[in-house]
Image: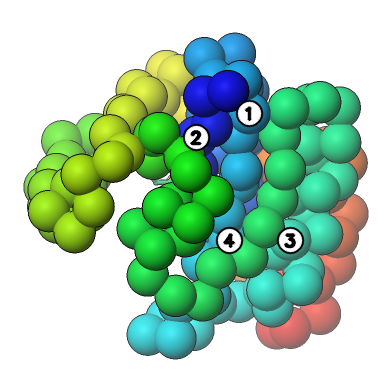
Amino acid sequence: MRLAVYPGSFDPVTNGHKDIIARAAQLFDAVIVLVSVNAGKHPSFSTTERVNMLLEITKDFENVRVDINDGLLVDYVKRVGAVAIVRGLRAVSDFEYEFQMALANKNLYDGAETVFLTTSTQNMYLSSSVVKEIACFGGDISHFVPESILGAITERLTNKK
Ligand code: ADP
């Protein structure tokens, strides 16, 4: 049973994240999408909202689960017995941070490998921040987020303004 953990903020989840989840689900026996409760960041969506959106978009993937982590990633990975940490790479700009995190995690825990999946071309410029910025100004984000959560994201970000 080869289990992978895909950690992130998912604030909110985008088509780019969903694509990585789908591809990881093909590569591994099971995947846990792990919502990081990062105290250093101020997410726009609450942990519950982020989890609910992920549950909605992953409901058809039989080998994908969603969980929350408020501790050190490697402690979680070790606890569940995962063999891989999945991350997505968009551009060179992602590389330095991701490389640093992968090395740090490997240093802390040698039992799992960080596996990078390159973005699909259509998601190359897609990030949660871009989605939030466009939606806040009333722009169309329908090409950027899964259809089943489009209403929830739009309503939430528009109301916030
Ligand atoms: P974090 O705050 O941990 O970076 P994010 O939710 O921003 O959380 O991203 C989680 C992971 O998903 C990261 O590895 C990021 O590079 C990847 N990712 C985000 N957007 C995309 C995308 N459009 N295509 C591929 N990977 C992506």
Mark toward the viewer: 4 or 2? 2
Of callouts 3 and 4, which one flags the residue occurring earlier in the amino acid sequence? 4
Of callouts 2 and 3, which one flags the residue occurring earlier in the amino acid sequence? 2
- Which quadrant does the C terminus fall into? bottom right
- Which quadrant does the N terminus fall into? top right
Q: Are marks 1 and 2 in contact (CB under 8 Å)?
A: yes
Q: CA distance from mark 4 to mark 1?
A: 16 Å
Q: Amino acid at mark 3?
A: Val
Of callouts 4 and 2, which one flags the residue occurring earlier in the amino acid sequence? 2
State the residue position of label 4. 35
Of callouts 4 and 1, which one flags the residue occurring earlier in the amino acid sequence? 1
User: x, y percentage for residue 130?
Assistant: 49, 54
Q: Residue at x 37, y 85 (%)?
A: 40
Q: CA distance from mark 3 to mark 4?
A: 7 Å
User: x, y percentage for residue 142?
Assistant: 74, 39
Q: Closer to the camera, 65 or 150?
A: 65
Q: Are marks 3 and 4 in contact (CB under 8 Å)?
A: yes
State the residue position of label 1. 30
Q: In the picture provided, is 64 more to the left or to the right than 55?
A: left
